[in-house]
Amino acid sequence: MRDANLISSCAFPAAGGTAATIGIDLGEPLAMAHGTRLPSKVEAVISYTALPNLADAHSATLTLQDSDDNLSFTSISDVATITGAGGIGAAAGNTRFRLPPLTRRYLCISITVAAGGGDNSASTATLSLDVFP
């Protein structure tokens, strides 16, 4: 079972657009030994619904980002690139990404759809966190 405060979703943008989830608050920085902020193993889980309108050979890229202020986000890593194929877009999927120990307080995913990629606004992406002791 996941904490509802650690889940954020958004719709994919249309072709040539970018969208982002609302930032998830990881909490105040923790005073841990060796400067680490995350006391446990924390994984970001990024899942997305099928993208039937993603045009062949065009892609949607999901990027994990962090921020100190929930306003200005910086990319941590591209975590998924989804490419349309066969005239049917792309299937639903998910990926997991272990957060670096010094991840800043707020976390979101940014979604960019390539120009010509079709209107994917009926599809959604969700960021959630799994925290392990």
Image (tube, rainbow, N blue to C red):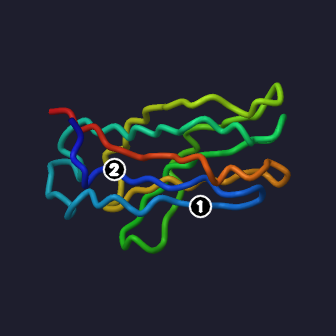
Of the numbered discs in the image, which one, if any, rests on residue 57?
none
Relative side of 27 to 21, left or right: left
Residues 110 and 77: in front is 110
Residues 53 and 102: in front is 53
**Mark 1 or mark 2, earlier in chain:** 2
The residue at which mark 1 appears reads as: 19
Residues 109 and 124: in front is 124
Element under disc 2? strand
Relative side of 128 to 114, left or right: left
Percent x, y of residue 118: 79, 49
The answer to whether residue 36 is above or below residue 48 is: below
Percent x, y of residue 131: 23, 38
Percent x, y of residue 112: 67, 54
Residue at left 23%, top 47%?
Answer: 38
Percent x, y of residue 89: 74, 34
Residues 40 and 59: in front is 59
Residue at left 54%, top 30%?
Answer: 93
Residue type indicated by callout 2:
Ile
Bin the neighbour count of mark 1 within 10 Å (Cα to Cα): few under 14, some 14-19, many 20 and up: some
Residue at left 43%, top 36%?
Answer: 97
Residue at left 39%, top 62%?
Answer: 23
Relative side of 52 to 3, left or right: right
Element under disc 1? strand
Bin the neighbour count of mark 2 within 10 Å (Cα to Cα): few under 14, some 14-19, many 20 and up: many
Quadrant of the image for the C terminus? top left
Of the numbered discs in the image, which one, if any, rests on residue 7?
2
Q: Quadrant of residue 16?
A: bottom right
Residue type indicated by callout 1:
Ala
> Marks 2 and 1: in contact by CB < 8 Å?
no
The answer to whether residue 124 is above or below residue 84 is: below
Quadrant of the image for the N terminus? top left
* Count of numbered circles in the view: 2
